[in-house]
């Protein structure tokens, strides 16, 4: 029997849910990914399977014989379904479109399920039996509060981004909760424009899309902004000279594109805009922009478009679309992400060809809008971009403020600089690497999450796809990339440090150098600078290796922090015999340094990978005496795949050992240890970073 035939039969067979199967099927058609909590005898599952989502997870603590029949029927029709023998309270999953809950019908159970899973749901949470057990529990519990609707009411009170979409009172009751549309607002504020952003944020809080959930992505060189109603997501960038700060905005936004993909709408606003009166809705078209005031001066002939035919922003003088201003644009999430990524590539192509479009980002925006179908673009009128030096009237929605004079910008810069260090960065990180793309993203994210401001990376001849990983950061100005050109001689790692990193030390208060298998962290706090501030009178901080093994990983794990949790003892020393009969040791007492640059003698430079000038005051933090204030998780072996494809292939950066030194004997010698250490993994989970 086909899935469709079985579905029709179940719809016609009286049960406690058959009258709702058509509703579940229609909801399923709107969703690419569905999780069903509570499979029972496999009835509702057929409604979801018939919708043919990209992924369907059916979850229950009890597996009935009907489950295997259902799985086999789905396989025949190439429907991607998986049964998980789990409790709904022990399960975690990535974001999905719909969650269906039909488990234990008690206030306590549903409250915990909603709290645990709601942040992972994009569209719908659907609950069964909300009439039968609306204000009573299915079984006796100790809770004084009873019923599913009580749990829902409390959930909606504390989670304003959800609303009741539909309540069906027949057939025991079915409740559909719908996530309100979420909006990402992007804005950039460096230099003097920081003074303007505070007022823009206040006006967004008061007037802009009050019924929608909004996150404001602030890209700035300081983190000083707050919102009374909306979430501020701060992204550190460095100020760039005009016009690059505006020309590179698409590249800056593209560095966060994976996060932006989860939003229903994305809107860019210049920091000099001000919401003047309530804006309650967004255009229905995939994209929108705002008319440029200069359209009043022309009849469709735009002398200010980019006329260089070699530029990706080229537009002819005459066009059938109005010229739009670059101060505000956006639309549906997917369409706007495509715009951002496309214009990121276009602006970078121009820059590589030494071309700067006449009106920078605005020229590229108008070129993009010129080639999309007219039906896909809404052009908002002048009331959404009203010049601040014009006479304001009652229909004005958004004001484009008059630029502050140079003097006021300098005053703002002076006031902000007092809050910041005299150095460009508080904490920077350096590394040298070769073919480390397996862990690169996790390593970079780890350090930025812990307060590192800038990373200097030295490529020592990589042949993998690492550029795909780091170029968004390079483009955003948070990573500087060097290519190592030092020949294969002894001690070339230190020589690379002195050539590429030493000249940049003066830009940072603290500077650390760590390989990509070394994850420095504090078990006591998330931000490394919170620890460093306690030791500001020390010239050097030393941290010990805690040496982790591969946890028997054959294939390389998605996350070495999550997967590799076994390590050697703190005082353990291991020796490996190399093919040339020399010996190498790995010990927990090995250290790496963090330099307080005001005490560092740049004339001497670096002389060793593990230690620096002994004439300055130093302290070791990876011990009980100092409460293990900072340690290094050293993931030496990671997986057999990593060892074979990376470690065994690349040789030794310093040429101290032969290129074939890291063989399987070497691996087995160091792939030891039975001390369970999940502190870093637990910290990531605690702060929502895993």
Image (cartoon, grey):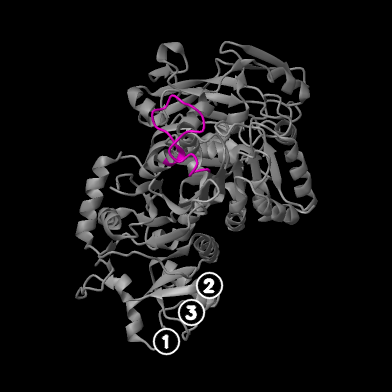
Left or right: residue 276 compared with residue 129: left
Look at 44% across and 18% down and name the residue there.
621
Helix, strand or loop for disc 3: loop
Whichever of callouts 3 and 1 sits on the residue coming sooner in the sequence is 1
Report the residue marked by disc 3: 307
Look at 61% across and 34% down and name the residue there.
559
Look at 59% across and 18% down and name the residue there.
676
Q: Residues within 10 Å of mark 2 (few under 14, many from 20)?
A: many
* Mark number displayed over residue 472: none
Give the quarter of the image for residue 672: top right
Q: Is residue 561 magenta?
A: no
Compute the Cα span from label 3 to label 1: 15 Å
Marks 1, 2: nearer the viewer: 1
- Residue 177 seen: yes
Q: Is residue 146 magenta?
A: yes
Compute the Cα span from label 1 to label 2: 21 Å
Q: Residues within 10 Å of mark 3 (few under 14, many from 20)?
A: some
* x then y, percent, for residue 93: 58, 40
* x then y, percent, for residue 670: 68, 19
Helix, strand or loop for disc 1: loop
Left or right: residue 486 compared with residue 255: right
Residues marked 2 and 3 touching at CB (< 8 Å): no
* Mark number displayed over residue 311: 2
Helix, strand or loop for disc 2: loop
* Mark number displayed over residue 300: 1
Nearest the viewer among 486 and 574 is: 574
**Height in image: 120 above or below 288?**
above
Residue range (magenta) = 129-149
Left or right: residue 75 compared with residue 226: right
Marks 3, 1: nearer the viewer: 1
* x then y, percent, for residue 359: 41, 71
């Amino acid at each position: 029997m086909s899935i469709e035939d079985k579905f029709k039969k179940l719809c016609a067979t009286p049960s406690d849910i058959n009258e709702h199967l058509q509703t579940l099927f229609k909801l399923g058609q709107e969703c690419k990914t569905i999780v069903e909590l509570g499979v029972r005898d496999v009835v509702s599952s057929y409604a979801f399977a018939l919708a043919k989502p990209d992924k369907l997870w059916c979850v229950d603590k009890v597996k009935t014989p009907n489950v295997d029949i259902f799985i086999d029927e789905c396989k025949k029709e190439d429907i991607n379904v998986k049964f998980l023998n789990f409790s709904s309270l022990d399960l975690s999953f990535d974001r999905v479109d719909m969650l269906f809950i039909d488990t234990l019908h008690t206030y306590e159970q549903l409250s915990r399920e909603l709290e645990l899973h709601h942040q992972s749901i994009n569209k719908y949470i659907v609950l069964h039996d909300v009439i039968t057990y609306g204000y009573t529990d299915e079984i006796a519990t100790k809770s004084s509060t009873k019923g599913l609707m009580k749990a829902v009411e409390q959930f909606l009170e504390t989670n304003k981004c959800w609303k009741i979409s539909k309540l069906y009172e027949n057939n025991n009751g079915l409740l559909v909760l719908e996530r309100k549309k979420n909006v990402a607002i992007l804005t950039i504020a460096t230099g003097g424009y920081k003074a303007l952003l505070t007022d823009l944020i206040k006006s967004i809080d008061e007037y802009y899309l009050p019924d929608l959930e909004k996150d404001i992505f602030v890209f700035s060189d300081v983190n000083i902004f707050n919102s009374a109603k909306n979430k501020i997501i701060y992204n550190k960038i460095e100020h760039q000279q005009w016009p690059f700060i505006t020309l590179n905005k698409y590249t800056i936004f593209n560095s966060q594109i994976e996060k932006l993909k989860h939003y229903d709408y994305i809107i860019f606003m210049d920091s000099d805009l001000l919401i003047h009166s309530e804006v309650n809705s967004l255009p229905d078209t995939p994209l929108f922009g705002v008319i440029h005031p200069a359209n009043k001066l022309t009849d469709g002939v735009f002398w200010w478009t980019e006329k260089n035919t070699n530029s990706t922003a080229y537009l002819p003088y005459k066009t059938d679309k109005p010229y739009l201003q670059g101060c505000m644009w956006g639309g549906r999430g997917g369409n706007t992400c495509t715009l951002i990524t496309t214009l990121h590539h276009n602006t970078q192509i121009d820059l590589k060809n030494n071309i700067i479009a006449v009106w920078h980002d605005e020229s590229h925006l108008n070129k993009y809008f010129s080639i999309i179908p007219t039906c896909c673009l809404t052009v908002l009128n002048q009331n959404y971009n009203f010049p601040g030096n014009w006479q304001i009237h009652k229909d004005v929605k958004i004001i484009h403020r008059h630029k502050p004079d140079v003097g006021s910008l300098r005053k703002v810069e002076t006031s902000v600089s007092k809050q910041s260090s005299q150095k460009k960065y508080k904490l920077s990180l350096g590394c040298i690497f070769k073919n480390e793309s397996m862990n690169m993203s996790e390593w970079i994210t780890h350090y930025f999450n812990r307060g590192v401001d800038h990373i200097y990376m030295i490529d020592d001849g990589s042949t993998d796809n690492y550029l795909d990983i780091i170029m968004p950061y390079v483009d955003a100005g948070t990573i500087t990339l060097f290519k190592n050109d030092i020949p294969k001689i002894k001690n070339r790692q230190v020589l690379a440090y002195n050539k590429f990193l030493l000249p940049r030390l003066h830009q940072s208060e603290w500077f650390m150098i760590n390989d990509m298998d070394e994850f420095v962290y504090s078990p006591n706090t998330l931000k490394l600078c919170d620890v460093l501030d306690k030791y500001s009178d020390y010239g050097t901080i030393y941290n010990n290796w805690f040496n982790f093994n591969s946890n028997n990983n054959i294939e390389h794990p998605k996350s070495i922090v999550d997967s590799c949790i076994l390590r050697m003892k703190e005082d353990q020393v291991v020796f490996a015999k190399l093919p040339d009969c020399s010996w190498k040791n790995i010990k927990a007492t090995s250290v790496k340094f963090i330099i307080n640059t005001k005490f560092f003698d740049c004339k001497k430079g670096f002389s060793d990978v593990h230690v620096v000038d002994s004439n300055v005051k130093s302290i070791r933090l990876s011990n009980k005496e100092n409460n293990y204030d900072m340690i290094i998780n050293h993931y030496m072996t990671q997986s057999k795949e990593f060892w074979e494809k990376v470690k065994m292939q690349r040789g030794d950066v310093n040429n101290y050992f032969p290129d074939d030194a890291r063989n399987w004997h070497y691996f087995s010698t160091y792939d030891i240890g039975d001390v369970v250490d999940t502190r870093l993994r637990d910290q990531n989970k605690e702060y929502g970073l895993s």
